[in-house]
Each structure stands twice: as C-alpha cells, then as structure tokens.
Image: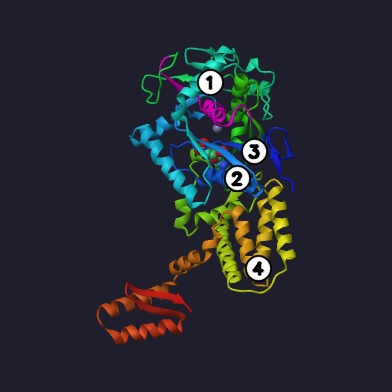
C-alpha cells in the first residue's frame, strides 16, 4: 500500500519513497528551551510522533534528528530583539545554561507523558558551535555571506529563487514594511547567520569576527547536514516556520551545498484558543500540568489532537479536551471488555479493519478518519480478544498506551470517588482509629448499599465499585 504525504514545497500530496534504501532521514525543529512548552507546541510533537509511527508501520527504519534551541532565537523573526534564552535568564536571575537544562528536562518529561517517541538524535545548538562556524565560513568563501558591523548576513540576491517555500511577495512586503532596514544590509531581506555579541551578552564564542553567537536558522542547516547529509527525506515544523525559519534554512543550505536540504517539508497547523493563535507572547497558553489540574491527562490531550487533521487548525477549549478525556476512558473500557471475551471474529474482518486503518493513516496521516475505525472496533457488539489485539496493533500508531488500559481505569476510579462516598470512607477511618467497630461496620454496610465494597488491608482500606 502506498504512503502519500503532503509537501509544502510542491503544495501537493506525493507518494513517499525514501531517497536511499529503507531508511528515512528526518529533521524536526525542536523547542526553544527558555520556558515551559505549551500544548500548542506539543501539537507539533504529537504530529511528529504520528509521522514516525506511520513510517515505521510502513516498514521503514528511521534516522531522526531533533534540535534543542538553546541559543540564538531572537524575540522577533527579523533579527531583532533579545535572545530568548538570555531574556529568560535575566528575568529568572539564572545562568542561561541552567535555564536551558531545566526546561529541556521538563520538555522530555512531558514528551514521555504524551508517549511521544524520542528521535534517534537530539542535537543541542550550543554543542554544535564548531559545525556552525564551519558553515558560516563556507558561505563566506562561496560569496553567499558578508560581514557588517553587527553580523554576518546571508545575501539573498545570490540565489536564483527566494523565497521557495512560502508565497511571500518580497516587493510588496518591502513596500509595506514599517521597520527601518539596517543600512549596512545589501538587501532588506538578508538575514543574520552569525551575530556579533553585545558586551553584556552571556552566550558568546570566539570567532574570526570576534565574540559572537549563531543566528537561529543556522543550527538547523548545520546540524541537519552533519547528521543527515546534504539532502534528506523529510523536514518538519510548525506553519509559523514556513515564511522565515525554513525559508532561510533552505537559503543557507543552498548556498553551502547547492541543494534544498530536504525533499519534503511538512508543517503542522496551529492549535488555537478562542479562535486565535495560542502563543507564549500572547500569554494565552496552557501547559500539560494545567490540563492535568482539570482532570485532563496528557494522553487525553493527544487523543484531542487526533480530532483534526494536522494541516487544519484546531481550536482548544477545556470542554472539548474534557470530552477527549471521556472518550479515552471509553476507549480503555472498550478495550478491556474485548480482552475479557472470546467470541469468534473472522480473520477476514480483522484484515479489513487493518487495511482500512492503514489506508487512513497512509493518506497524509488522516487521524480523524483512522479514529473513526478505532471506534468501530471499540464499540463492536461482538466482544473478542481478537479485537483487543487489533486495538493494540492500532496503538502502535496511536501511542495511547492502550495495553495498560485497566491500570488507568482503576486509577481513575480511585480519583473519581463521589464526595459522599469519600466522606463516608473518611468517617469509617476515624471510627476504626477510635476502635469503634460497630460504627465501622455500620458505615461498611452503608457503603455496600451505595454500591461500594470496602476491604480492610494491612495498609488501611481499599474501595471498589461493585
Ligand atoms: P518554539 O519552542 O517556540 O520554537 O516552538 C516549538 C514548536 O511548536 C515549533 O514547531 C512551532 O511551530 C510549534 N508551535 C508553536 N506554537 C504552536 C501552536 N499554537 N500550535 C501548534 N504548533 C505550535
Ligand atoms: Zn529549525
């Protein structure tokens, strides 16, 4: 069965075949670790996870690089403002490396909670300064970059085409631009590949141009090339990367190698809130912890992401995320019900479900369609172990940890004791502490009447819904 994936570069869905053999080489733009990643960011990584899992389901092996931006990402995409890392360091009164290490750890903890597979190679910008310096040298040698008093700029007029990824009309943008263009730039849209550090800048390195630091786009060109070669299969990111970050990455890489670094560029649409963009700068973001406080598990958020195709906007509300939490519990209950029964299902029926599911995910990762098939199996009136196994096979792509469904349900029950029951349980605990066995038994009977079986264990009490 063929796999088709959309390519932003050609604006078409195309059949996917790796450039070389059976291995798919992927580069994903990772987080800038100056703060907590929010659920909008995680939509991008849930998409990345689905892509990985679908490629593996098509029997490909992966070599996947994700970067960690720990230097050089300025507040504005047009080479202006402070470095986000330095700004956070100043605000929190910490060293930028400390900030980076703290938020990187939390990022990977959250990736784990979302059951997102970790790419094979994690590349930190600050650990690749020499690779980036070599890249800048190549650009200068090949006459694609030049020095000013502020930075080393990439000269976009040297390219046959710019832009190639977006529909940006540079002439119109220049005419409409309100910002003053740096007079030292040869062309208004030249961008910094390497930036000279002001006196008080903390993250800076020796270079032929004095103490300085890399521009944000450079790390992706240099690290992608280092680990995946001059051209690889897939590059991923969010739609916000299209007009500047990825456009400029392509420009630099074409300058250095003559090639667009990836054959295929895939971009995930934004998670919105109240119909508008969710972003840190607008202050309308939520973290996984904030969802959890409202009883929405990270995996329920992952399921929520599957309600829309990755190329369409998805609007976040707590109500819809709560519905996904309920849906996740129903999915778990459905799976557990199938594990406990043994009605016979024909191999043909199982095969048909498998085919339909694979067709859906192979059609540019159509998760909403794939979920429709999952629900058909969950709700199937025939209860069978074969369906339980089928759901486990689907879960290789869904990544919802279905095999542990029972454990999650038990936890859920414990958490969701009605207030009245929790109160009775507490009263019984006090009665027992006071050795008031009659009262303890009376409450036990009352709980039984209300449908709860209480047991005394060596660690205290356990309660189960009957
Ligand atoms: P950053 O840490 O800001 O560099 O962003 C990390 C990733 O999250 C990038 O791939 C962004 O494109 C993506 N991103 C940021 N905000 C959103 C959002 N609201 N919805 C989806 N993806 C987002
Ligand atoms: Zn990048």
In this orientation, which residue lies closer to the viewer: 305 or 231? 231
> Which x, y percent locates residue 458?
32, 74
Per the image, label 1 sits on a secondary structure element best described as helix
Of the residues under marks 1 and 3, which one precedes in the sequence?
Answer: 1
Of the residues under marks 3 and 2, which one precedes in the sequence?
Answer: 2
| Residue depth check, mark 1 versus mark 3: number of the one nearer the observer | 1
Per the image, label 2 sits on a secondary structure element best described as helix
Residue 333: name its quadrant: bottom right
Above or below, comparing residue 135 to residue 398 in the picture: above
Above or below, comparing residue 368 to residue 51 in the picture: below
Of the residues under marks 1 and 2, which one precedes in the sequence?
Answer: 2
Q: Magenta span has 213?
A: yes
Residue 135 is marked as 1
Magenta range is 210-231
**Mark pair 1, 3: CA separation:** 24 Å
How packed is label 2: few (under 14 Cα within 10 Å), some, or many (20 or more)? many
Residue 379 is marked as 4
Residue 276, visible in the rendered structure: no
């Amino acid at each position: 069965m063929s796999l088709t994936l959309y390519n932003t570069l050609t604006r078409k869905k195309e059949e996917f075949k790796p450039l070389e053999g059976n291995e798919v080489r992927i580069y994903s733009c990772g987080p800038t670790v100056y703060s907590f990643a929010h659920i909008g960011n995680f939509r991008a990584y849930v998409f990345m996870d689905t892509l990985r899992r679908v490629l593996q389901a098509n029997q490909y092996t992966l070599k996947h690089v994700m970067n960690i931006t720990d230097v050089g990402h300025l507040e504005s995409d047009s080479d202006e403002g402070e470095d986000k890392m330095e700004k956070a360091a100043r605000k929190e009164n910490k060293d930028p490396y400390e900030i980076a290490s703290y938020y990187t750890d939390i990022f990977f903890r959250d990736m784990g909670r979302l059951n997102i597979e970790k790419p094979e190679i994690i590349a930190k910008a600050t650990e690749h300064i020499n690779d980036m310096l070599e890249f800048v040298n190549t650009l200068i040698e090949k006459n694609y970059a030049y020095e000013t008093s502020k930075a080393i700029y990439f000269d976009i007029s040297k390219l046959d085409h710019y832009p190639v990824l977006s529909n940006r009309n540079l002439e119109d943008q220049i005419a409409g631009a309100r910002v003053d263009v740096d007079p030292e730039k040869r062309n208004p849209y030249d961008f910094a590949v390497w930036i000279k550090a002001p006196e008080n800048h903390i993250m800076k390195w020796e270079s032929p141009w004095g103490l300085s630091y890399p521009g944000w786009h450079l790390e992706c060109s240099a690290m992608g090339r280092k680990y995946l070669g001059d051209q690889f299969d897939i590059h991923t990111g969010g739609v916000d990367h299209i007009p500047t970050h990825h456009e400029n990455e392509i420009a630099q890489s074409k300058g250095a190698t003559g090639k667009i670094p990836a054959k295929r560029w895939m971009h995930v649409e934004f998670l919105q809130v109240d119909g508008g963009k969710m972003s840190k700068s607008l202050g309308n973001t939520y973290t996984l912890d904030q969802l959890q406080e409202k009883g929405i598990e990270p995996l329920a958020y992952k399921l929520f992401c599957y309600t829309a195709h990755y190329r369409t906007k998805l609007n976040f509300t707590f109500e819809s995320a709560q519905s996904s939490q309920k849906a996740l519990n129903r999915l778990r209950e459905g799976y557990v019900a199938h594990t406990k029964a043994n009605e016979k299902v024909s191999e043909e029926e199982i095969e048909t479900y498998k085919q339909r599911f694979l067709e859906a995910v192979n059609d540019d990762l159509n998760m909403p369609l794939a979920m429709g098939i999952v629900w058909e199996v969950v709700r199937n009136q025939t209860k069978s172990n074969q369906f339980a196994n089928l759901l486990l096979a689907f879960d290789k792509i869904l990544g919802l940890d279905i095999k542990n469904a029972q454990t999650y349900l038990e936890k859920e029950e414990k958490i969701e004791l009605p207030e009245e029951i929790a109160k009775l349980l507490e009263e019984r605990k006090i009665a027992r502490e006071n050795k008031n066995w009659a009262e303890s038994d009376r409450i036990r009977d009352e709980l039984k009447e209300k449908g709860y079986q209480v047991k005394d264990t060596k660690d205290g009490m356990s309660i189960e819904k009957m």
